[in-house]
Image (cartoon, grey):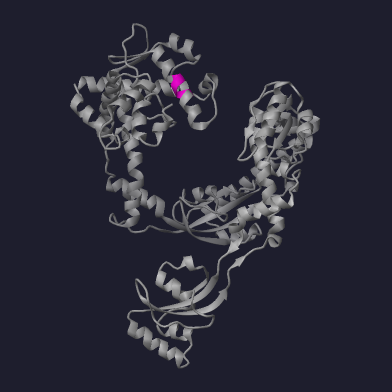
Amino acid sequence: MMESMRNAAKSWVAKLLIGLLAVSFGIWGIADVFRSRSTSALATVGSQDISAEEFNRAFQTYIQNLARQTGQSITPEQARSMGLDRAILNNLIQSAALDDEARRYKLGVSNDFLLKDLQRNEGLKNAQGAFDAERFKQILSQNGMTEAGYFANERRRLLRQALTETASGSAPVSLGLLEAQYRYENEQRDARYFVVSTQDSEVPAPTEDEIKAEYDAHPAAYTAPEYRAIAMMKVEPSDVAATITLTPEDLTAGYEKYKADYFTPETRTILQISFPSEAEAAAAKQKIAAGTDFLALAKERGFTEQDVTFADKTKADFIDPAIASAAFSLPEGAVSDPIKGSLSTVLLKAVKVTPEHQATLDEIKPKLEERLRLDQATDEIQSIYDAVEDARAAQTKFEDIASKANIPFQLIPVIDATGQDKDGKDVDLPHKAQVLQAAYASDVGVETDAISLDNGYVWYEAREVIPAALKPLEEVRDEAARAVTAQKVKALSEEKAKALVERARTGTSLDALAAEAKAKVETAEGLRRTESGDTFGPAAVQALFAVPDKGFAYAMEPDGRSARVMQSEPVLLPAFDAASADVRGIAEKMKPQLSDDILSAYLTALQTESGVTTNEQMWQAISGQQTN
């Protein structure tokens, strides 16, 4: 809707499309179009009612706009399963609370202000820069709105905006909070540590009861995913190109058409030294004429070879016309007289000259043939698409359609949503991600639209659906046994690490404990709470910063088989300077969060003060969910 207006007046469209709820569920949007008293309200906020009709219209509007924004349709059931209905109702309640607050304070926006704001809108001005009233009326008509409705919506929007911006404002970050956050982010610690491991042989072998318990406790781990059989055919220029035969006349015409694409302009490698005056440039030219090397002269003037070398440049690469003309008139190896450019005077030396070259038909024949075949193939794609669609409408099988149209057909008997077969091997198919997403969103017997590519199409259909199913225990016994062993190994490693930390805390040195565990003590420096890497993962960093200076801690390693025993080294607390760039940056990052927190608290307080009641029976009838 209003596609022609989207680029010219985004702010205007945003005001007219009041029903559009942003994905982040902003404060205004859904409720702007609706505000009527109802004898049977879905929800009441102070003196403001929210009717079931308002909610349903807002809900449908959001679903439609979401489909336009994402290009994917969504059913009301899917929206409800994602909690969008609850979020939309909350948005309506928040908007109503703001309206109620504006009413209590007797806030208003004058008609004169609204009119001037409308007339300033750049998207509604004509070629002479004046407000175009007819265009305004046309857009209102296209969206089923009246002038009175538009101005009422704008008045509510501006009042809500005034309330929320006043509440959240640009809240300053207190120095105490800023210093705490600065130290949290910048405190550094060193760590001495070693790793203690456990081998499978150190733990008892899994018993049948343990294997069965593991199998029963984690059915998802032993459930085969849903599999589908998918048939697909496709047409792209590369599929058609091989069937195209070119005549000598086609090649000649194609060469003339694309001849300029196979022209290589002259390039040169030029050395260039800049001088502040023509006199200095002339003196330098005399020194070069007397035997001084050009690059040696450049180094005398403080330039490196890289500074003065312009390698393999075309004439167009030189911005200054005078320098470009001189550079491309020099014989190879020659040095120019002083050239006065627009910004400086220069000396030039042509080091290497590569002449221009127009490739002949024979030189580019293989590439040109491929290009021309692809061109013709691209032109034929639409006719092939039409023929395939006609055949599909006649209920012709994919196999027969592909054979007649001479396009690739592929039947994938078994594939899961990630693209693997039952053995866990990747299945090769073109445009895999798109085909899988579409095929798993479809079903057997459902007629689907072709997937549109840049220059082609893919047709697909689900031939069979094999539902996800729990594998028999006998089939996954070894897998379950390995899981039980892994759990035992992890538990024993954690037990070892915990015991070592307790001994360290009672006086045994880290080095002695490492020697006992036959491990090597390592050192990590400059660790921060907010940073982790391959050497020190998030769990280890968190554990290290949870103990005081010289304290001991342990953390499980990512492999799940070993644990890290650590000692915190002296803590580095950087000095806090409220005027530093780092601190200012932290403050800027914290301001939006503080504003959001304040706004959230304000809206919650408004709803509490106004009083919110919801018709539970009506809500369940609409959504089938309990309100909280």
Query: Which quarter of the rendering shows the C terminus?
Result: top left
61 in the magenta segment: yes
Which of 351 and 467 lies nearest the eye of the viewer?
Answer: 351
The image quarter in which residue 163 lies: top left
| Residue 448: percent from left, percent from top | 65, 25
Q: In which quarter of the image is residue 44?
A: top left
- Would residue 77 appear left or right of 237 to someone viewing this image? left
Q: What stretch is highlighted in magenta?
A: 59-63
Asked if one can make out residue 153 in the rendered structure from this viewpoint, the answer is yes
Q: Nearer the viewer, residue 428 or 148?
A: 148
Residue 471 lies in quadrant: top right
Q: Residue furthest front?
A: 249
In what quadrant of the picture does the N terminus appear? top left
Residue 80, percent from left and from top = 51, 21
- Asked if residue 376 lies left or right of residue 120, the reply is right
The residue positioned 39% from the left and 15% from the top of the image is 54
The secondary structure that dominates the magenta segment is helix
Q: Would you say residue 401 sits in the magenta stretch?
A: no
- In the image, is 283 to the left or to the right of 503? left
Count of marks placed on residues: 0
Position of residue 335 in the picture relative to residue 202 (left or right): left
Q: In this view, does 557 lie above or below 319?
A: above
Say above or below: 274 vs 159. Answer: below
Q: Specify whether residue 110 is in view.
A: no
Nearer to us in this view, 224 or 278:
278
Picture layout, residue 303 above or below residue 93: below
